[in-house]
Image: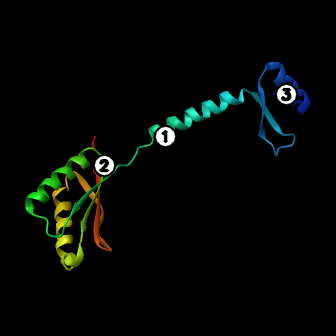
């Protein structure tokens, strides 16, 4: 690799019909490279796009219960939750307490723990039931399928 003064490097880049790109400005002498800058930017964007596509996107599905959810409704929602976990989505199950139903906190927790045990073979509990304001939430992540 030859070392050229900046004017000679500019002349060579102009002769080749490419841009002179400064790679390391702090070096003595500054390091520059003759290249097509637009093509370089295009390829860089292309690489970033490919990396984004390879990254896995986490989908979070929600299921809402009331503290006095009936058995049939529970089974119906449990089947949906099972399908979500099989599809590879995370599950956010929560019990919403309206008005004075907050006195049934224990019922809500029992309901979420029952859901966790029923879905044990499809996913594992990421966060145990936790009361946040008027909501008791629990997260279940899917088990890895081979």
Q: Position of residue 126 (x, y in %)?
A: 31, 60
Mark 1 or 2, nearer chain start: 1
Q: Which residue sits at x=29%, y=73%?
A: 134
Give the alpha-carbon distance from disc 1 to disc 3, as whole Å: 38 Å
Label 1 SS: helix
Q: Are marks 3 and 2 in contact (CB under 8 Å)?
A: no
Please give the label number shown on residue 127.
none
Image quadrant holding the N terminus, namely top right
Sequence-first disc among 3 and 2: 3
Q: Quadrant of residue 135?
A: bottom left
Which image quarter holds the C terminus? top left
Q: Which residue is mark 1?
A: 52
Residue 89, labelled with which disc?
Answer: 2
User: Label for residue 2?
Assistant: 3
Circle 1 or circle 3, nearest the eye: 1
Picture layout, residue 133 above or below residue 52: below
How far apart marks 1 and 2 lie (CA) works out to 19 Å
Camera-side residue of 133 and 34? 133
Where's residue 101, x and y in %?
20, 76
Q: Which of the 4 image quarters holds residue 91? A: bottom left
């Amino acid at each position: 690799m030859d070392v050229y003064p900046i004017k000679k490097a500019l002349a060579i880049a102009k002769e080749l019909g490419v841009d002179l790109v400064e790679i390391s400005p702090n070096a003595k002498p500054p390091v520059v490279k003759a290249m097509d800058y637009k093509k370089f930017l295009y390829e860089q964007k292309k690489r970033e796009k490919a990396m984004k596509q390879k990254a896995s996107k986490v989908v979070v599905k929600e299921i809402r219960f009331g503290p006095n959810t009936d058995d049939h409704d529970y089974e119906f929602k449990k089947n949906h939750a099972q399908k979500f976990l099989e599809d590879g989505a995370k599950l956010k199950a929560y019990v919403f307490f309206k008005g004075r139903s907050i006195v049934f906190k224990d019922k809500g927790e029992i309901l979420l723990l029952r859901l966790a045990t029923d879905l044990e073979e499809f996913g594992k509990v990421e966060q145990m039931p936790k009361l946040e304001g008027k909501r008791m939430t629990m997260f279940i992540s899917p088990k890895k399928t081979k």
